[in-house]
Image (cartoon, rainbow, N blue to C red):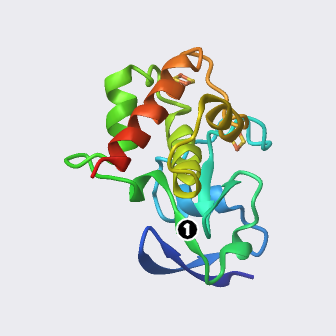
Amino acid sequence: MKKHLTFTLNGNAVTVEMLPHALLLDVLRETLDLTGTKRGCGEGECGACTVIVNGATVNSCIYPAWKVENCDVLTVEGLGTREEHHPLQQSFLEKGAVQCGFCTPGMLMSSYALLQKNKEPDEKEIKKALAGNLCRCTGYKKIIGAVKDAARMLNMP
Ligand code: FES
Ligand code: FES
């Protein structure tokens, strides 16, 4: 039997119908058609499906959707728009931190969660925050550089 799930998604209240054991990634991608969040491993290992629930990152591929009842959920669609990028999106593009782009939404969300808590993270802190996000293309250096640049941008008066 289907259940109703109500939560805040990228700043807007939403209510969806879902099967009791639905996973958050499926609700986002299949029910709400928000396909920015990617399915990589589907086992909580690669971070491609990372979204933010009440300020903390979760792997939505293994996260039961019922847990977001009345929570604030942020996905990559809520970060910026095609016309107006979030500074993180802008610096990822400028630094060449996006290649195939499959890991990028998850990288952005983990980076965003880090910068919410730590406005000037050093390299070690960035690496720690992104430890659960795998990229098979970039070698991570440009991603780390992009996070540092975005932090600088966000800290500008
Ligand atoms: S798809 Fe969720 S961690 Fe890989
Ligand atoms: S850019 Fe291809 S997996 Fe990261």
Quadrant where the N terminus is found in the figure: bottom right
Ligand 1 within 8 Å of disc 1? The answer is no
Q: Can I make out residue 154 in this image? A: yes
Quarter of the image holding residue 87? top left
**In front of the other: 122 or 6:** 122
Quarter of the image holding residue 88? top left
**In front of the other: 80 or 38:** 80
Q: Position of residue 4 (x, y in %)?
A: 63, 85
Q: Residue furthest left?
A: 83
14 sits to left or right of 61? left
- Could you tell me which residue is drawn at 57 percent across and 40 percent down? 121
- Could you tell me which residue is drawn at 62 percent across and 46 percent down? 49
Give the residue at mark 1. Answer: 73
**Rendered view: 136 above or below 93:** above
Q: SS for tag 1?
A: strand
Amino acid on which the number 1 mark rests in the picture: Val
79 sits to left or right of 139? left
Quarter of the image holding residue 17? bottom right
Q: Can I make out residue 26 in this image? A: no
- Could you tell me which residue is drawn at 30 percent across and 47 percent down? 156
Q: In which quarter of the image is ligand 1?
A: top right
Q: Position of residue 108 (x, y in %)?
A: 50, 42
Q: Residue furthest front?
A: 157
**Rendered view: 49 above or below 142:** below
Q: Where is residue 146 in the image (x, y as percent from the top left)?
A: 44, 29
Q: Position of residue 21 (x, y in %)?
A: 79, 69
Question: Badge 1: few (under 14), some or many (20 or more) residues near its Cα, within 10 Å?
Answer: many
- Could you tell me which residue is drawn at 43 percent across and 42 percent down? 151
